[in-house]
Structures are given as structure tokens and as C-alpha cells.
């Protein structure tokens, strides 16, 4: 029985209800980002800066000596799920992916924390940080510090640092014509996240989303050590098409992508055919359409999946044809059972030809 003196206990707010977007779908549209960066002065010449902003690569790289280069990146976003621990795990896995995509091994992380203190409890915020710390522990590194602010929307991520031998550094700009393109994780995280917000994602779909977004891309350094692997990037907020275009522009090459062979998360095709999509996929397509040759028969849902923002997506590896099977075998042995060849690099203009 309630009385006038009893206070009403409000249930905790859904994390996703506190943010206007979630995961890597929060990224600024590529065309808008390019406009912004046009007004930023170019950095000076630094002989030890091996990778800067020139080719939109995954991380910055600074040569420390002949044996070591420091890889530095930062990544953060708003919630893509409501469970605070899972949100922390996903954000940390996504941030560390940039280190692995350069062929490096992480050495430490710093936390980036922005939280609405009047809305989320200290316990909830602590669970977010605990999830991130758990992923870093799995990667064998500490969260050695960070910075926090009181923010209108919840934001969490990491600054991540790693080390790589300069000779084993992989960038997105050294792909060669004829290389096959291997994708290690299936597409559809953006569709899943949109379905989750619409309460249309079933338990199996949610489990698949958590599984793929918390799976560390720690196989990256092993790819970098393989003969025939020429370039690598991870597929995140700009979708498969966008990150492949960055690889094309970095290498001065074109690419072909077979839309029907791109692996998809379970149930994603049905959701996509039913019109589930993110606003980010449309923004991505609008940003890249001038650099894409797509046939008229390309169905809208397939097009959307090519630009679907992948929170903590897979690695995209450009590898010589005679070594592609070895990359696939290693990926599958390391738990990336969906790994598949999705296209190839071609000579010519930096654009992508989509094959149905």
C-alpha cells in the first residue's frame, strides 16, 4: 500500500534515450567533415610523423626509433545499447580496433568520459567504465587515466596507444592493383542498432550484436606479419563503402565490391528489406555517391548496407590473391568465422564499382 509520504522510485533512464545518435552512427558525415577540415591549417613537416591526417587513416603514427613506432588514436561515442556494461565494452573494443588496424599492439589506454550527472547514477557510470576496463584487461593493457566532464549526453571512449615495428606498419594507402579484399566481420550493426531503438530487435539479434561489437580485432598484427598483405583498415562509421574509398584514395586505385558476397549478421537482410536503416547510412551514401559506380538494379537495402555504419566493425584487408586463403584461414581460426572476400583493388581512378 502506498502513502503520501512514500516517494516514487523512477526506473533508470534508457541510455539510448539520452542520446540523439549512437555508436559510430554518431560520426559527422564524411562530406561535412571534409568541409570542416578544409579550414584547419596543414601540419608542419615532421620527419618522424609516419602517418598523419593526409589519407584519413585509422591512427597517427610517430617513429620513436628504428625498431619502434608509436600508434595513437582516440574514439568515443554515445550509447548504442542500454546496458551500461555492454556500452563500455563496445566503446572500448571499437577504440582499440584502430590500433590493431595499423598492425600494432596496444600498450595502454586513457578513458574519455562525458556523463549527465543529474540523470545517470554513479553506479551506472561506474558500470560503463568497468565494461571498458574489462575489454582493456582482455587486450592485456591498463586504463591508465583519463578525463571526465558533466555532459548533456552520455559519451564514453578511449585514447589508445600502441607500438609497432616501422617495417610492419600497415596503412590504408599501400594496396596494390589486383589485391583481393577480405572483410573479417559481417555487416549490419547499424541496422541492428536502429532496430533496437525501434524495439524490433529480438534476443538472438541483440546477442549477435553484442558478440560482434565486443570481439577484439587483435588478429590485425598477425595479418601485418603475413607476406602479401599490403594494406588494412577497419570498417566503422563510414560503412564498408566509405572506408574502402579511403583505401582507394590513399593508394590512388579503384576497387570493385561484390554486394552479394558481403557477409551479413543474422536477420539483417530481413530487417533491411523491411526498411530498417540509420540516418547515417543515407548521409554516407550522399557523401560518396560521386565516387561510386552502381548499377540501376542495385536494390536500396543492399546499397544501405554498403554504407551502414559499423560500430566496432571488422578489418578490411588488401592482400595478394595467392595469400588471400591464408588470411581467410587465419581469420576463421581466430574466431572470425564470417570472413569473406568481398572485392578487389583495380587500376584507375579512385572510385568503387559496385557489382550486384
Image (cartoon, grey):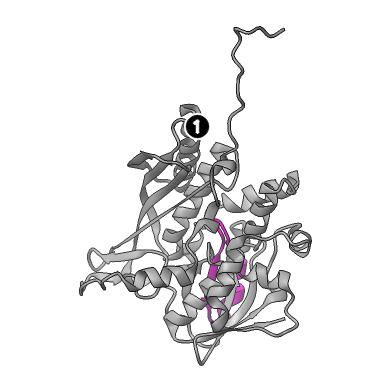
> Left of 348 or right of it: where is 168?
left
**Side (left or right) of 96 relative to 66:** right
The residue shown at (39%, 54%) is: 106
Binning the other alpha carbons within 10 Å of mark 1 as few (below 14), some (14 to 19) or many (20 upward) gives some
Q: Looking at the image, is 15 positioned above or below residue 343? A: above
- 9 sits left or right of 272 in the view: left
Rendered-image quadrant of the N terminus: top right
Give residue 66's position: percent from left, percent from top. 24, 68
The image shows residue 5 at horizontal and vertical percentages of 59, 7
Q: Nearer the viewer, residue 39 or 70?
A: 39
Magenta range is: 309-329
150 in relation to 346, above or below: above
Residue placed under numbered mark 1 in the picture: 120
Is residue 321 visible in the rendered image? The answer is no
Within the magenta stretch, is there residue 311? yes
> Percent x, y for residue 9?
60, 19
Q: Is residue 283 visible?
A: yes
Q: Quadrant of the C terminus?
A: bottom right
Find out whether residue 294 is within the magenta segment.
Answer: no
**x then y, percent, for residue 268:** 73, 59
Amino acid at each position: 500500500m502506498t502513502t503520501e509520504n512514500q516517494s516514487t522510485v523512477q526506473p533508470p533512464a534508457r541510455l539510448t534515450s539520452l542520446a540523439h545518435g549512437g555508436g559510430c552512427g554518431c560520426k559527422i558525415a564524411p562530406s561535412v567533415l571534409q568541409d570542416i577540415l578544409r579550414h584547419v591549417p596543414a601540419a608542419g613537416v615532421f620527419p618522424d610523423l609516419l602517418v598523419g591526417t593526409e589519407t584519413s587513416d585509422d591512427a597517427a603514427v610517430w617513429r620513436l626509433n628504428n625498431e619502434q613506432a608509436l600508434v595513437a588514436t582516440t574514439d568515443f561515442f554515445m550509447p548504442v545499447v542500454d546496458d551500461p556494461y555492454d556500452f563500455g565494452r563496445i566503446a572500448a573494443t571499437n577504440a582499440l580496433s584502430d590500433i590493431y588496424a595499423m598492425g600494432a599492439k596496444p600498450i595502454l589506454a586513457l578513458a574519455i568520459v562525458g556523463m549527465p550527472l543529474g540523470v545517470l547514477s554513479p553506479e551506472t557510470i561506474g558500470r560503463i567504465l568497468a565494461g571498458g576496463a574489462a575489454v582493456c584487461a582482455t587486450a592485456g593493457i591498463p586504463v591508465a587515466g583519463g578525463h571526465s566532464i558533466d555532459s548533456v549526453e552520455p559519451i564514453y571512449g578511449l585514447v589508445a596507444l600502441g607500438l609497432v615495428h616501422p617495417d610492419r606498419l600497415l596503412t590504408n594507402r599501400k594496396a596494390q592493383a589486383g589485391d583481393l579484399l577480405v572483410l573479417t566481420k559481417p555487416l549490419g550493426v547499424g541496422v541492428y542498432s536502429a532496430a533496437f531503438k525501434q524495439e524490433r530487435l529480438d534476443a538472438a539479434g541483440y546477442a549477435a550484436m553484442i558478440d560482434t561489437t565486443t570481439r577484439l580485432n587483435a588478429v590485425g598484427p598477425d595479418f601485418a606479419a603475413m607476406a602479401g598483405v599490403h594494406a588494412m583498415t577497419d570498417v566503422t562509421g563510414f560503412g564498408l563503402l566509405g572506408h574502402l574509398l579511403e583505401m582507394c584514395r590513399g593508394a590512388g586505385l579503384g576497387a570493385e565490391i561484390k554486394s552479394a558476397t558481403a557477409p551479413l549478421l543474422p536477420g539483417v537482410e530481413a530487417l533491411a528489406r523491411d526498411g530498417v536503416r540509420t540516418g547515417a547510412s543515407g548521409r554516407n551514401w550522399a557523401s560518396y555517391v560521386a565516387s561510386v559506380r552502381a548499377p540501376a538494379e542495385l536494390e536500396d537495402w543492399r546499397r544501405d548496407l554498403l554504407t551502414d555504419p559499423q560500430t566496432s566493425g571488422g578489418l578490411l584487408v588488401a592482400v595478394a590473391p595467392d595469400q588471400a586463403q591464408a588470411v581467410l584461414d587465419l581469420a576463421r581460426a581466430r574466431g572470425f568465422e564470417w570472413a569473406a572476400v568481398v572485392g578487389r583493388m583495380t587500376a584507375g581512378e579512385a572510385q568503387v564499382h559496385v557489382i550486384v
